Image (cartoon, rainbow, N blue to C red):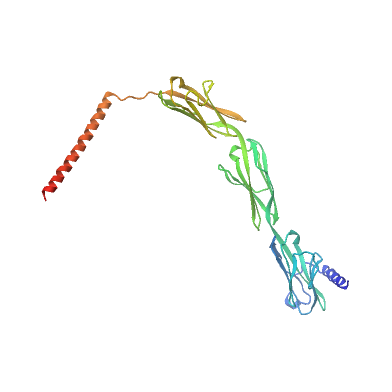
């Protein structure tokens, strides 16, 4: 009971000491009220609170917000993270492990001397890594819609927020705010978006996918000339989201694959119509149609006949003459080689 009253009296005396006094010189040790430089620690680290004493010290205590943590060797705090590190004539140091936000604040070392009490105070600042607490989920919208993407984060110091677009068609910073607003979204703005929360400690980065729906946009078809009995190929290409389905028509009649020697190959953005043995009835106008839930687009192309050029008699004669010339030249080369060989042998 006596000890409690004594330390309560010391705590009350400390509360009367003005805050923010400058650090005094060593010659003023009997009346020092020192304010040390701030201690900055990251969340989860260990903080050491060190207090220098003198020979005339009778009692010492560490306090936090008027709560006594240690009174000499006696631990008053019920927090298991707080422990005594050093207690000697020259030093009184305690440690706080695994610090967190609620450990931030002013700590006071109260020293009772034979003449008067004095204090040493220090402010502990806790830095917390940023953590993204709220992020818009992956989103699918129709082209022309107005959207707002949210990315909020916690941390100390307060983290800055940066939005980046990582799509193949556009890259770079698009916003430096929690909200990324796009008033009329286009297909070129679809892709992966990255939110980064950054402070002095570290960074937290997360992404979301933005899908923009739009009706098919089809490329202009190309006409093709094919001889009778040969293979004819027509093709078309379309951009769409969701992916378009393709249909082929000849005049007003829809064409079905694997019927009458015709094959249709559909890929995500591409469709190919192949006629393996072109006949007279295959010539004409063809239409490729791309369709999705938002609309359709089409393009037309013409399959027309071309004649195979047959070689004339004069062309054949010229080919024979060219062949004879080549044969004569080869024979002359062989003959010359034989004469040179015989001449070389006769010399020996």
Quarter holding residue 210:
top right
Residue 345 drawn above or below residue 62: above
Question: From this viewpoint, which residue is outermost toward the bottom?
Answer: 55
**In the image, farthest residue toward the right:** 1
What x and y, as percent, mark residue 304? 44, 23
Question: Residue 170, how many percent across, how many down?
Answer: 57, 43
Name the quadrant containing residue 76. Answer: bottom right
Nearer to me, 48 or 156 = 48
Residue 111 visible somewhere in the drawing: no
Residue 33 image offset from top left, x and y in percent = 77, 72
Residue displayed at 13% across by 45% down? 342
**Residue pictured at 56% horizontal, 32% vertical:** 217
Residue 266, horizontal then vertical, whole percent: 53, 32
Q: In the picture shown, does residue 143 fall above or below 300?
A: below
Q: Nearer the viewer, residue 233 or 110?
A: 233
Viewed as shown, does residue 95 lie left or right of 271? Answer: right
Q: Is residue 303 above or below residue 19?
A: above
């Amino acid at each position: 009971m006596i000890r409690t009253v004594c330390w309560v009296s010391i705590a009350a005396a400390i509360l009367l000491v003005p805050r923010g006094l400058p650090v005094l010189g060593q010659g003023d040790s009997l009346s020092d009220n020192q304010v040390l430089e701030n201690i900055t620690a990251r969340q989860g680290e260990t903080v050491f609170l060190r207090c220098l004493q003198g020979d005339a010290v009778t009692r010492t205590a560490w306090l936090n917000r008027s709560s006594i943590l240690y009174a000499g060797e006696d631990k008053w705090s019920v927090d298991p993270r707080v422990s005594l590190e050093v207690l000697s004539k020259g030093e009184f140091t305690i440690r706080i492990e695994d610090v967190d936000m609620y450990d931030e604040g002013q700590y006071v070392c109260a020293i009772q001397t034979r003449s008067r009490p004095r204090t040493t105070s220090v402010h502990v600042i806790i830095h917390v890594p940023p953590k993204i607490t709220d992020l818009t989920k992956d989103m699918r919208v129709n082209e022309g819609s107005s959207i707002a993407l949210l990315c909020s984060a916690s941390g100390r110091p307060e983290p800055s927020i940066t939005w980046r677009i990582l799509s193949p068609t556009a890259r770079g910073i698009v916003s430096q705010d929690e909200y990324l607003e796009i008033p009329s979204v286009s297909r070129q703005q679809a892709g992966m978006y990255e939110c980064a929360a950054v402070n002095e400690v570290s960074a937290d980065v997360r992404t979301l996918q933005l899908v923009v729906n739009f009706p098919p946009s089809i490329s202009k078809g190309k006409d093709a000339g094919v001889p009778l009995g040969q293979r004819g190929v027509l093709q078309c290409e379309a951009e769409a989201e969701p992916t378009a389905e393709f249909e082929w028509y000849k005049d007003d009649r829809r064409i079905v694959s694997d019927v009458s020697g015709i094959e249709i190959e559909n890929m995500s953005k591409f469709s190919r119509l192949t006629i393996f043995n072109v006949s007279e009835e295959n010539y004409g106008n063809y239409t490729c149609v791309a369709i999705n839930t938002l609309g359709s687009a089409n393009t037309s192309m013409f399959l027309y006949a071309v004649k195979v050029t047959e070689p004339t008699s004069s062309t054949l004669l010229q080919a024979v003459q060219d062949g004879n010339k080549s044969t004569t030249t080869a024979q002359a080369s062989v003959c010359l080689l034989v004469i040179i060989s015989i001449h070389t042998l006769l010399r020996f």
